[in-house]
Amino acid sequence: MKKTFYYMLTITLALLTSSFALATSSHTDSVTLYFQNYSGQTPPEYHCLIKSISFQQTGFNITTNQPWNPPTITQVSNGDFQGIQITVECGHQGSSSVANYFSNTASVAISSKTVTPTFNTMPQDLNFVISGTLTVTNTLGVTTSYPVVFGEGHMSSGQDNWWFGGANFTTNATQGKSTGIVTSDYTYVISQNPNGSDASFYIQAMSS
């Protein structure tokens, strides 16, 4: 009887250890924010197009007891599109406290994986959030910075999805641009990437 008890106890402890290891394992994920590079072209309103963007991380929030490493931020290029890519290696356990961290900065948000973008809905659970400053320079050399957040969530389909939001951002239902969210100074709009990537967003000038 004792042998059976100890045998079952050993199996239970092994299963618990295995589950804990899975729950705290690290995954590598990336999100990209693109803009269209009009170098060598002269479209209308060329004077107010985007020349460059950069991102400086200022904070990070993740579910308690989950592993994480500092994100890496790189400049990327894909044909006529350029931008920044944020790569994170950390745990994938969602929690409402992380989503609250996102909502404390973002006034509106957009998800990378919704057929129809929703802006008045905030994420309920997120795996982790990266907060920081997005800096945009236009072709006149005017530079503006915005407090923003990127967060990774988990959909009911089993897929991960990314969220983007900014402080005092609004929506642009009637501006004729890609449906998205607008910076606090009403200069740039951020939308789902027109190239169809599930882990990227697109930024363009409101007057472009």
Image (tube, rainbow, N blue to C red):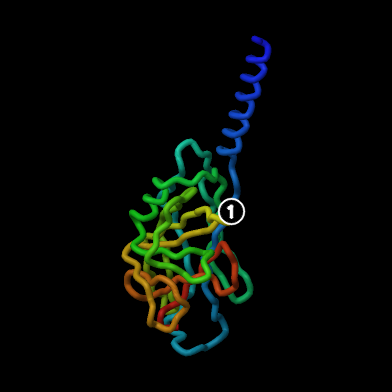
Answer yes or no: is residue 206 visible. yes
Q: Position of residue 15 (x, y in %)?
A: 63, 29
Q: How many discs appear?
A: 1
Q: Nearer the viewer, residue 15 or 81?
A: 15
Give the quarter of the figure containing the N terminus: top right
Q: Position of residue 96 (x, y in %)?
A: 41, 47
At x 60%, y 24%, the residue is: 13
On screen, residue 22 above or below 42: above
On screen, residue 208 above or below 164: below
Give the quarter of the figure containing the C terminus: bottom left
* Residue occupying the far top of the picture: 2
Q: Amino acid at mark 1?
A: Gly
* Label 1 element class: loop
Q: Position of residue 83 (x, y in %)?
A: 54, 67
Answer yes or no: is residue 202 visible. no
On screen, residue 102 above or below 141: above
At x 40%, y 67%, the residue is: 119
At x 39%, y 45%, the residue is: 97
User: What crowding class fits label 1: few (fewer than 14 Cα within 10 Å), some (14-19), or many (20 or more)?
Assistant: few
Residue position marked by numbered label 1 in the rendering = 158
At x 54%, y 63%, the residue is: 32
Q: Nearer the viewer, residue 28 or 110?
A: 110
* Residue occupying the far front of the picture: 1
Answer with the quarter of the image where residue 19 lies.
top right
Q: Position of residue 196 (x, y in %)?
A: 59, 70
